[in-house]
């Protein structure tokens, strides 16, 4: 069995914590581990091969870093040149899995789901694996706990011979209105569509070729010329761009006669909104979930998350309050689905809060934008031990660096020198320069930028150990 971890998506309904450049699967929303790391730890105890990851190019270093933090080996981080939905993403992973003549059973999981009962989850996997070995395409259906209108549903068919807890699939149903969802709950036999699957790699590709031949052909051709780039596997972007965009449900599962569903009752949630996160977290006696420095008076059944500052809430019920370094959200719990409209507006206005947090993570460390005005910007830069920023140049800004902790190795044109705590240097406009942490402890410095243009796109890279050199 080979896990395939789908780590794409932007989690826009969990803004301002989740953003395009650092979405919810990489955030520690329910404990100290990220959702991705929890997904991987959930596999402990299963007999399975090293997992394959599918993510977009912009998130590749985040995935690699979180795997390194958890000391988890992998069999490739497949990079989608652009999002094409789940059917092509899984096809890339399936072709990657069979390229050496092997044919593993694929366990396809989303990186951003919560499952509380791991034992029941493992039992359902064992059940599904037996079916997959019989050439079934298995989906996991969540036993519903409420008349939820945010999920698609699966209607169970007849029980499969020799298996007390597996069924054929009668039909896939789109997200219903409340009245219809209540009918499903009362009637029984309907399960939430979890988006988790299990099947042999060759079997999925066989059905994909039958029902979505263009997707099959594009993915097959795109991955034939795959290229290794550090921990990453790149496919042909030009060919993949021609691939139709479709979900596995529409492309395969709703068409195949080999679909089966295994019910799963394991405390599952896709944590798709702030209200669903409130549902699964421990609450105080007033029904409040409190995280961070928070003071409440006469507040009930609310979610309050303070990241940087003291947050005080008085006399409100059923609200969501989320404070970050650069944004604050206040919403009624009944309106959390509308957060996506706010995110769409931020994107349309090209505001940085759509894509980035104030602290931005890079493969070498991170930077935090502390202050900025028309012609200056102040950043706190952290460089991990042994890491190095690219050799680069700026056309429009000069930089002052002041070391706070650690040791910096600085290259500036033809000079290379060390800076230690309380020492500084100046990088003029147009100077070729780089920064490295040669020490054993993190390097932290303050960078003051000054100039007519301070955007991140004013970087010309000449060499870079992370493959980000300008073409």
Image (cartoon, helix red, strand yellow):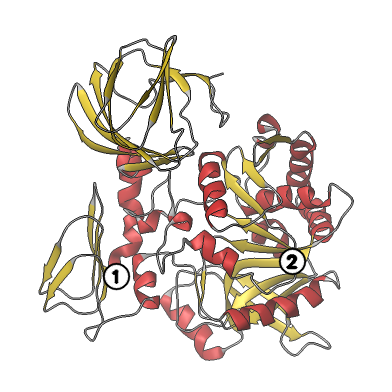
Q: Is residue 216 above or below residue 455?
A: below
Residue displayed at 80% across by 37% down? 224
Q: Depth-wise, is mark 1 or mark 2 nearer the camera?
A: 2
Q: Residues within 10 Å of mark 1 (few under 14, many from 20)?
A: few
What residue is disc 1 on?
334
Marks 1/2 in contact by CB < 8 Å: the verdict is: no
The relative height of residue 24 versus residue 456 in the rendered view (above or below) is below
Residue 447 visible somewhere in the drawing = yes
The residue where tag 2 is placed is 48
Instruction: Between residue 272 and residue 147, name the one nearer to us.
Output: 272
Helix, strand or loop for disc 1: helix
Write down the quadrant of residue 227 in the picture.
top right
- Residue 22 place in picture, x, y as percent: 43, 48
Which of the 4 quarters of the picture holds residue 257? bottom right
Of residue 52 and residue 243, the one placed in the foreground of this image is: 52
Q: Nearer the viewer, residue 406 or 102?
A: 406
- Residue shown at the point (78%, 52%) measured from the top left: 97
Inter-mark Cα distance, 1 to 2: 41 Å
Residue 52 lies left or right of residue 326; in this view the side is right
Q: Residue 81 sits in which quadrant? A: top right
Residue 368 lies, with reference to residue 18, above or below; the image says above
> Can residue 349 be seen in the rendering of this structure?
no
Q: Position of residue 95 (x, y in %)?
A: 78, 48
């Amino acid at each position: 069995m080979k896990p395939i971890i789908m780590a794409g998506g932007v989690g826009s309904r969990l803004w301002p914590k989740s953003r395009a450049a650092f979405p919810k699967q990489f955030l520690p929303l329910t404990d100290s581990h990220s959702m991705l790391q929890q997904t991987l730890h959930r596999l402990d105890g299963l007999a399975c091969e090293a997992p394959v990851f599918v993510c977009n190019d912009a998130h590749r270093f985040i995935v690699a870093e979180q795997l390194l933090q958890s000391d988890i080996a992998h069999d490739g981080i497949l990079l989608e040149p652009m999002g094409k939905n789940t059917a092509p993403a899984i096809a890339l992973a399936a072709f990657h899995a069979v390229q050496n003549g092997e044919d593993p059973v694929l366990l396809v999981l989303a990186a951003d789901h919560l499952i509380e009962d791991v034992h029941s989850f493992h039992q359902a996997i064992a059940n599904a694996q037996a079916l997959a070995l019989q050439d079934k395409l298995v989906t996991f259906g969540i036993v519903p706990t409420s008349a939820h209108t945010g999920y698609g549903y699966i209607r169970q068919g007849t029980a499969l011979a020799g298996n007390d807890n597996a069924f054929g699939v009668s039909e896939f149903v789109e997200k219903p209105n409340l009245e219809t969802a209540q009918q499903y709950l009362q009637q029984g036999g309907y399960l939430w569509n979890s988006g988790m699957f299990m099947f042999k790699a060759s079997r999925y590709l066989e059905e994909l070729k039958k029902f979505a031949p263009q997707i099959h052909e594009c993915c097959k051709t795109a991955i034939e010329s795959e290229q290794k780039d550090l921990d990453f596997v790149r496919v042909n972007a030009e060919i993949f761009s021609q691939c139709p965009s479709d979900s596995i449900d529409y492309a395969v599962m709703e068409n195949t006669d080999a679909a089966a569903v295994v019910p799963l009752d394991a405390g599952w949630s896709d944590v798709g909104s702030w209200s669903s996160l409130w549902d699964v977290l421990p609450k105080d006696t007033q029904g409040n979930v409190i995280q961070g420095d928070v003071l409440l008076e006469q507040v009930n059944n609310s979610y309050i998350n303070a990241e940087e500052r003291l947050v005080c809430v008085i006399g409100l019920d059923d609200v969501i309050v989320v404070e970050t370094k650069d944004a604050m959200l206040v919403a009624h719990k009944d309106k959390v689905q509308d957060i996506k409209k706010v995110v769409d507006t931020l994107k349309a206005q090209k505001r940085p809060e759509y894509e980035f947090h104030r602290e931005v993570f890079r493969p070498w460390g991170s930077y935090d934008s502390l202050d900025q005005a028309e012609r200056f910007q102040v950043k706190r830069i952290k460089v991990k031990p042994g890491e190095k920023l690219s050799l680069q140049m700026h056309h429009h800004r000069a930089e002052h660096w002041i070391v706070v902790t650690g040791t910096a190795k600085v290259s500036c044109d033809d000079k290379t020198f060390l800076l230690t705590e309380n020492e500084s240097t100046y990088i003029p406009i147009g100077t070729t320069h780089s920064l490295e942490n040669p020490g054993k402890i993190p390097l932290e410095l303050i960078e003051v930028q000054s100039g007519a243009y301070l955007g991140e796109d004013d970087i010309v890279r000449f060499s870079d150990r992370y493959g980000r050199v300008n073409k």
